[in-house]
Amino acid sequence: MGALQLPCYNWWRVRVEGDLGMPAWVHRGTGFAELCLVSLRGYAVIADDAISETLTHVVTCGVMGGALYTWHCAARDPIGAVPATLMLCSSTAAVARSGADRRAHAAAALAAGSGAASAAAIFPRERPLGRIP
């Protein structure tokens, strides 16, 4: 669903998130990343490829780290963080089933932190915190 941010940003902003203050290019980039993730995860399942599964998990954690920062810290709307939290949990469960080692989980944790730090750097400081309808 998040991939709709790429081709349908205005629809996404009006019907899903509202104006969180992030630039449109952030949403379009996230939509592109989500399209890539769906494709790579599909390949990993079909080919039973643990490396692709791990890579998908690391990128997912990076994107969701940014989403968690945006919803919890910037928009101050914890309910909005539920999809990102569910995505992180399901991705972690999927990569754990594939037999990934601790390095994969450490890389994913670093990616989540990097995503959160990136969102914090991108989020406009002059904008009041909270969600704008």
Image (tube, grey):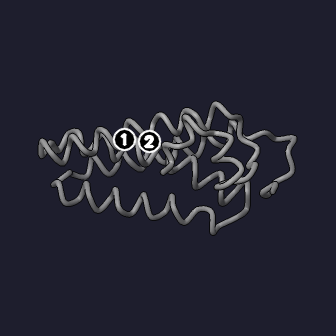
At label 2, which amino acid type do we have?
A: Glu
From the top left corner, tell me how far across and down residue 93 is, in percent. 29, 62
Q: Which mark is residue 107?
A: none
Query: What is the tally of numbered marks visible in this picture?
Result: 2
Q: Residue at x 43, y 48 (%)?
A: 61
Q: How far apart are the alpha carbons under marks 1 and 2? A: 5 Å
Residue at 63% x, 69% y: name it.
Answer: 79
Residue 54: give x, y in percent of width and height: 26, 44
Q: Are marks 1 and 2 in contact (CB under 8 Å)?
A: yes
Residue at image position (45%, 36%) is: 33
Q: Return the residue at label 1.
A: 37
* Rendered view: 95 above or below 25: below
Asked where in the image residue 24 lies, by quadrant, the reply is top right
Q: Who is closer to the viewer here, 73 or 103?
A: 73
Graded by Cα atoms within 10 Å as few (under 14), some (14 to 19) or many (20 or more), the crowding at tag 2 reads many
Q: Nearer the viewer, residue 108 or 16?
A: 16
From the viewer's perspective, is 114 left or right of 129? left
Please state which amino acid type lies under the numbered disc 1.
Leu
Left/right of residue 8 with respect to residue 53 in the rendered view: right
Q: Percent position (x, y) of residue 62?
A: 47, 43
Residue 119 to residue 69: above or below: above
Along the viewing direction, whichever of 117 and 50 lies nearer the viewer: 50
Looking at the rendered structure, the secondary structure element under dot 2 is helix
Question: Which image quadrant: the C terminus?
Answer: bottom right
Q: Residues within 10 Å of mark 1 (few under 14, many from 20)?
A: many
Outermost residue, left side? 48
Image quadrant assignment for residue 28: top right
Q: Secondary structure at mark 1?
A: helix
Image point 71% across, 35% down: which residue? 23
Residue, disc 2:
34
